[in-house]
């Protein structure tokens, strides 16, 4: 079963919220104590991966498990991945603006 319209809308909102957090995330990972602890080789890819993980984690775990009382089906997981992929340009644009 694909994502329902209401679920897709919530996912889009979560993606937009995570995109809005990118400037703060970039500032934080540039702090000396963060750099010393994590040894990030590619800041942009780290931020992209972190943002992607935050979206998936929040939506699949928090939204589905807490609100729907179930884990997403494989088709729903595919829809989640496709939706994030469709927004990947927006995510990468936001990352490039914080350089």
Image (cartoon, rainbow, N blue to C red):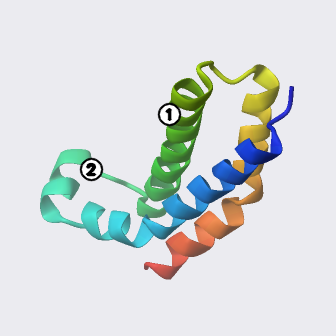
Label 1 and label 2: CA atoms lie apart by 29 Å
Near-viewer residue (84 or 46)? 84
Image: 33 above or below 99: above
Residue pointed to by mark 2: 39
- Considering every residue shown, the one lying at the far left of the view is 33
Decide which of 36, 60 is in the foreground and name it: 60
Q: Residue at x 45, y 57 (%)?
A: 47
Quarter location, residue 70: top right
Query: How many residues crowd around disc 2 within 10 Å: few (fewer than 14), some, or many (20 or more)?
Result: few
Name the residue beneath numbered marker 1. 62
Could you tell me which secondary element the residue under label 1 belongs to?
Answer: helix
- Position in image of residue 96 (x %, y %): 53, 76
**Is residue 35 positioned above or below 96 on the image?**
above
* Residue 69 spot, x, y in % from top left: 59, 20
Numbered badge on residue 45: none
| Tag 2 secondary structure | loop
Disc 1 versus disc 2: nearer the observer: 1
Which residue corresponds to the image point at 59% horizontal and 32% vertical from the top-left?
Answer: 60
- Disc 1 crowd rating (10 Å Cα; few below 14, some 14-19, many 20+) is some
Position of residue 67 relative to residue 25, above or below, is above
Of residue 43 and residue 3, the one placed in the foreground of this image is 3
């Amino acid at each position: 079963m694909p994502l329902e319209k209401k679920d897709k809308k919530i996912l889009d909102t979560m993606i937009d919220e995570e995109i809005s957090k990118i400037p703060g995330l970039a500032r934080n990972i540039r702090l000396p104590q963060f750099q010393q602890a994590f040894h990030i080789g590619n800041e942009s890819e780290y931020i992209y991966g972190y943002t992607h993980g935050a979206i998936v984690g929040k939506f699949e775990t928090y939204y589905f498990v807490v609100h729907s009382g179930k884990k997403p089906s494989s088709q729903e997981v595919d829809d989640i991945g496709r939706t994030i992929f469709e927004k990947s340009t927006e995510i990468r644009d936001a990352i490039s603006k914080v350089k």
